[in-house]
Amino acid sequence: MKYCYTPSARPNSRIDVADILRGVAIAGIILIHFQEQMNFFLFPEPKNELWASINTKVWDSIFFLLAGKMYAIFSVLFGLSFFIQHDNQAQKGIDFRPRFVWRMFLLMLLGTFDLLFYNGDILFIYAVCGLLVIPFIRASNKMIWFFIGLMLIQPVELIYLIKGIIDPSATPLYLNSGMYYGGLIESQSSGTLIDVAEAGLKLGLPANFLWAIENGRMTQNVLFFLTGIMLGRTRLFYNEGNNLKIWKKILIGSAAAFAVLLPLYKFIPGMFEAPCISNSLSVALNMWKNFAMMFFYVAGITLLYYNTSAKNWLIKIAPYGRMSLTNYLTQSIFGALLFYNWGFGLFRHFGHTADFALAIVFVALQFLFCTWWMKHHKRGPFEQLWYSATWLGKKK
């Protein structure tokens, strides 16, 4: 790969709106995880038809508004952070790439720790995909845009789509992730913390990777990370030049794209009997509509922050976003404590509506803790641990 990288001429100052977006994303992810009862999906029967209807509406609303979109925001900001860290060091004449490899190894360790409690960990997968984008951090803009386009068309799904056209009886990509997830249920429903930890390490890691491959998440992660790198290079999150006009165009364009893609996602895959075609179209269209809605959220919040008095309220979210790693890991620990058998076993009693209320309370408590903590510390507990270990043996 040809490298055409020149460090930025301007400093990469703290981007408050990125912290706000990160806070919104992690809160949304927690709402989804609590709806899923931390990857458990074993819910009690509703007391009556009314509660069943309410539960369904709560579930559908949360997944419509948040699923795939919050994850995408979080992933894009991961790529943005990589760019900022690399560019800051490049301005000093330091190659950050070797240390980023070490940083991703540390993230794997944090992901392994997460698996002791929650088998749906994304940190380990992030670390692997982070390693995959290292060759691009010094590539030309043209090269990065090319691979963004390539990942956007989702090459794995495209291959299986073509396979389905050639052979309508061909089976979709399935790596048996369900078998691994099924093996986790016993430890969650009747096991101890030790049982959950053992199952998470043994079954959770392969389950996550296989599911991610089956559902296009591996190529999507690379897409999101590269998008974050380009947002960093173009300095689009700063209120400079015509950036706000660009965000207005993104807001309108993403809303229009979502309005087109949503009905396509709902109806087009079902028009094909060939399973390979139907499944590939479903995965691709789902990602495209989520990508569009993600950019609608990002553009909307960015414009609200820079153009309206809502900035005074939005900035209060920034401490929560700056502690996103701590918030993610603590939701795994306390979420498992709340829902699994080794803890309070709320899976036996809580339906979707109660899960939503519990998630709101939990996020609110996290928010209060983050607001207090960031008044006295520069970083969150796990953020400080990751930072200190990243720069072990070397001053920044």
Image (cartoon, helix red, strand yellow):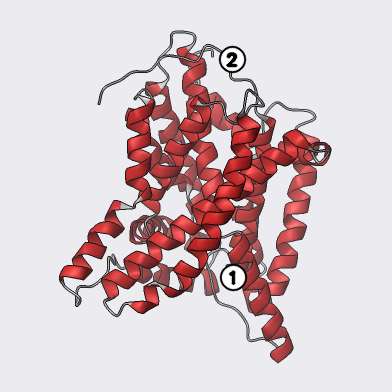
Residue most extreme to the bottom:
48
Could you say which is closer to the camera, residue 208 or residue 194? Answer: 208
The residue that appears at 24% across and 63% down in the rendered structure is: 160
Residue assigned mark 1: 341
Q: Is residue 362 above or below residue 99?
A: below
- Quarter residue 259 falls in: bottom right
For disc 1, the neighbor class at 10 Å (few under 14, some 14 to 19, many from 20) is: many
Q: Which quarter of the image is occupied by the C terminus? A: top right
Residue visible at 33% across and 37% down? 146
Compared with residue 286, is residue 136 higher up or lower down, i.e. above or below?
above
Determine which quarter of the picture holds residue 64: bottom right
**Residue linked to disc 2:** 11
In the image, 79 versus 364, the foreground residue is: 79
Q: Amino acid at mark 1?
A: Asn
Q: Secondary structure at mark 2?
A: loop
Q: Quadrant of the N terminus?
A: top left
The furthest residue to the top: 93
Front residue (pair 386, 53): 53
Relative to 73, say whether 105 is above or below.
above
- Could you tell me if residue 175 is visible in this image? yes
Distance between mark 2 and mark 1 Cα atoms: 50 Å
